[in-house]
Image (spheres, grey):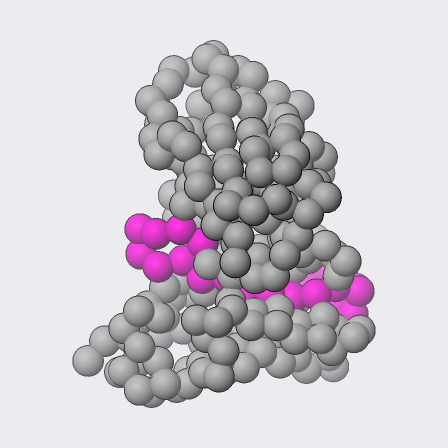
């Protein structure tokens, strides 16, 4: 069974940092690209970042470029999102999502982890 | 970036009815690289359609996608109770990948 399980969310103050993790299992980890997508409360979906395991190609949305960093640990089949200088508008459920490494539609998603940025 | 506009915002329907959802792009979506997702309350999105018309694994054939260029549609031929949800389109032809704002299909 394909599984993506996020962790690391929580309540932080503006300006603080947080690292999210996504553990993948049930398939060949290196054959895909991985993405972080967020959803603010009651709002739509926003793609944030992607990393291609084989090529190491990385991409970011302008809204997080310079503040967020995506990375992987291939030995642990895990993907991370380091989030710095957090703002209230970063409050959202953060999803890890897989694509097939060629086209960026997301065929598997984790259950999400909630990040709340508030003083 | 490509902006996707979905319409209508909300649809109130009954089981058994058919429905067509619209997704319009601000620029041509390269080679029909458009996907549709279904999201139920408290759940992650689920892929329904990719490549504008290809159903994902285990998606019932009452769901169908069409379109090209800037205009795309998702059709549900006969609504089942489990189909009441929010539907999002997403383009993956041009980075940054973007989503529409969603159409809510409610009873």
Q: Which residues are magenta?
A: A23-45
Quadrant occupied by the C terminus of chain A:
bottom left
The quadrant holding residue A30 is bottom right
So how many labels did they put on this image?
0
Question: In x, y percent, where is residue B23?
Answer: 50, 36
Q: Residue furthest top?
A: B16
Q: Residue furthest front?
A: B27
Answer above or below: position of A108 versus A63: above
Report if residue A40 lies within the magenta region: yes
Question: In x, y percent, where is residue A80?
Answer: 57, 77
Residue A77 visible somewhere in the drawing:
no
Residue depicted at 31% across the width and 56% down the height = A41
Viewer-closest of A89 and A22 = A89
Residue depicted at 62% across the width and 69% down the height = A50
The quadrant holding residue B32 is top right
Question: In x, y percent, where is residue B28?
Answer: 61, 44
Viewer-closest of B20 and A33 = B20
Answer above or below: position of B23 versus A92: above
Residue depicted at 68% across the width and 47% down the height = B30
Answer above or below: position of B61 versus A57: above
Residue A67 visible somewhere in the drawing:
yes
Q: Is residue B13 left or right of residue A22?
A: left
Report if residue A114 lies within the magenta region: no
Question: In x, y percent, where is residue B34?
Answer: 63, 43
Q: Is residue B23 left or right of residue A34?
A: left
Residue depicted at 56% across the width and 33% down the height = B71
Q: Is residue B6 left or right of residue B30?
A: left
């Amino acid at each position: 069974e394909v599984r993506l399980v996020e962790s690391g969310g929580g309540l932080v103050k503006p300006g603080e940092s947080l690292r999210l993790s996504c553990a993948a299992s049930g398939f060949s980890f290196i054959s895909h690209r991985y993405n972080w997508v967020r959803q603010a409360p009651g709002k739509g979906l926003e793609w944030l970042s992607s990393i291609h395991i084989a090529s190491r190609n990385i991409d970011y949305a302008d809204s997080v470029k310079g503040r967020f960093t995506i990375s992987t640990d291939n030995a642990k089949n895990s993907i991370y999102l380091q989030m710095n200088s957090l703002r209230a508008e970063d409050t959202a459920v953060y999803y890890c999502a897989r694509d097939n490494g060629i086209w960026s539609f997301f065929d598997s998603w984790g259950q999400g982890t909630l990040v709340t940025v508030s003083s | 970036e490509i902006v996707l506009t979905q319409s209508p915002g909300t649809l109130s329907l009954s089981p058994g009815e058919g429905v067509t959802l619209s997704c319009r792009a601000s620029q041509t979506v390269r080679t029909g690289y458009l996907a549709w997702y279904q999201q139920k309350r408290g759940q992650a999105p689920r892929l329904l359609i990719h490549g504008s018309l290809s159903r994902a694994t285990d998606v019932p054939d009452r769901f169908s996608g069409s379109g090209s260029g800037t205009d795309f549609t998702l059709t549900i031929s006969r609504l089942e109770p489990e189909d009441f949800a929010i539907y999002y389109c997403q383009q993956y032809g041009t980075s940054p990948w973007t989503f529409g704002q969603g159409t809510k299909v409610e009873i």
